[in-house]
Amino acid sequence: MDEFDSLVKQSKITLLGKELTDSSLPDIVKVLQKGNVEELNMMMNQITLQDDTTFTTELATNTTLKVLSLLNNQISNVGAKNLSKALMKNTTLECLILRGNCIGDEGAVDIATSFLFNDTLKVVLLGENNITNVGGEKLAETIAHNSSLNQVLVDSNPNMNVDIMQLKINNVLSMPSRKSSKGGSGSDVLPKDVVMKQLSSKDDIIATKDTQLHSAQVEIATLKAQLQSKDNQCNIHISELNKTQEELTTKNANIYKLNATINSLNADLVCKDQLLACKNTEIDLLKSTIDNPLELLCAYISNKDDEIRELNDKVDLFEKEMAAAQAAAKEAAAAAAAAVAKEEVEEKRDEAAAADTEIINEREDEEDKEVIKAALEAATASLDPMMDSLSIDSSGSDDPEMEKTTVAKKNEMKSPSGLVKEVHSIQVEEVEARDEVETN
């Protein structure tokens, strides 16, 4: 910002070797618009003026700049043509330095054409370019119709006969008729041959541009047709894509429902598997029970033996208690104690008889008579040796109470209702399990 303000305040600006390019020209234009610049030196940079419009447009309307130096830049024929358009409209520029660029005959012709419209330029330096004798002739031809130019240098152009061309240009510049009036003939009309050559050149350019424009229009029409076709195809594809999207949405919904159904079925299957595993376990247990009835009978007998032992222990304990009670009664009252003891014994016997009656009633279940009968026969047959042993033991004892106890034990063993019921229950469960397995 400080540098910009400093340049705006200067009337002579030198930007020597600043590596300026065409992209730097908009900033230069702002300086020209804000300030009062009379001399602008941009020598030894990289300016081409090929794609530039801002600088040449500003130069066409600028009213302060008098000296412009573009020495040793990269201006070619295109840049020279853009510059010549600005020179045709400029009314203040007096000195133009274009030495050391890449200007050829085409660019020299455009600059020479600008001399026909510009009446303020006094010095134009075109040395060290690529101008030949053709460009030199054109410069000399148009200089004759310009009344302001005092010096035009074309030295050091390697493809030009410099001495002859420079001498010819100098002779034209020294013609007295140039200074009298523009065109040298007392009128503002350009020579017919110059106008015809300019028009011919412009017609060729216009024809070329028309051809290019027509080609561009045809290409644009083709591109529009292709674009329309592409748009139609895109619309078709979009329509198909929307349909596909709708179908995909429907399929996704169906898949979601199917997944939910499958998950439910899987859950049911897991439950069925668990139930089947339980049933298999039960079946294995039933098989093991059915395959080993002897073990069950032995276990039952063992349980009954344990019950008999418990009863014997109770009897022994009771006898001991009775003996102690008798001894105590003899000491206190032998007759009363004996009567009381007899009554207690009778009560115990009645309780035992009632208990036996209940057991017998339980055995006589009408629904299982046949099963109970078979079980009783089997149990009786298997327990005969034990009963014989008990008979022998009871017959060898003189104690009537012991004999009664033994008889009760024997009756109990002859009627194992618990065993019969358990065997019947196992048979019923086995039948039910088989039916359930066949049903599954």
Image (cartoon, rainbow, N blue to C red):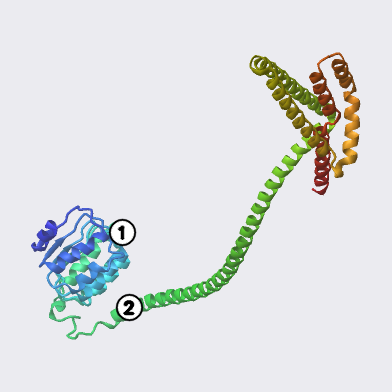
Disc 1 is placed on an element classified as loop
* Sooner in the amino-acid sequence: mark 1 or mark 2: 1
Residue 251, quarter of picture: bottom right
- Can the viewer see residue 21? yes
Q: Nearer the viewer, residue 269 or 416?
A: 416
Q: Nearer the viewer, residue 287 or 374?
A: 374
* Relative image position of residue 266 (x, y in whole percent): 67, 50
Q: Nearer the viewer, residue 202 or 437?
A: 437
Question: Label 1 vs label 2: CA separation?
Answer: 24 Å
* Residue 269, placed above or below residue 335: below
Relative to residue 325, is residue 349 drawn left or right?
right
- Can the viewer see residue 137? no
Relative to residue 115, is residue 250 drawn left or right?
right
Relative to residue 283, is residue 189 drawn left or right?
left
Q: Which mark is residue 197?
A: 2
* Relative image position of residue 54 (x, y in whole percent): 24, 68
Give the residue number, with chain letter if any, for mark 1. Answer: 159
**Which quarter of the rendered picture does the N terminus lie within?**
bottom left
Type of amino acid under label 2: Lys
* Relative image position of residue 209 (x, y in whole percent): 40, 75
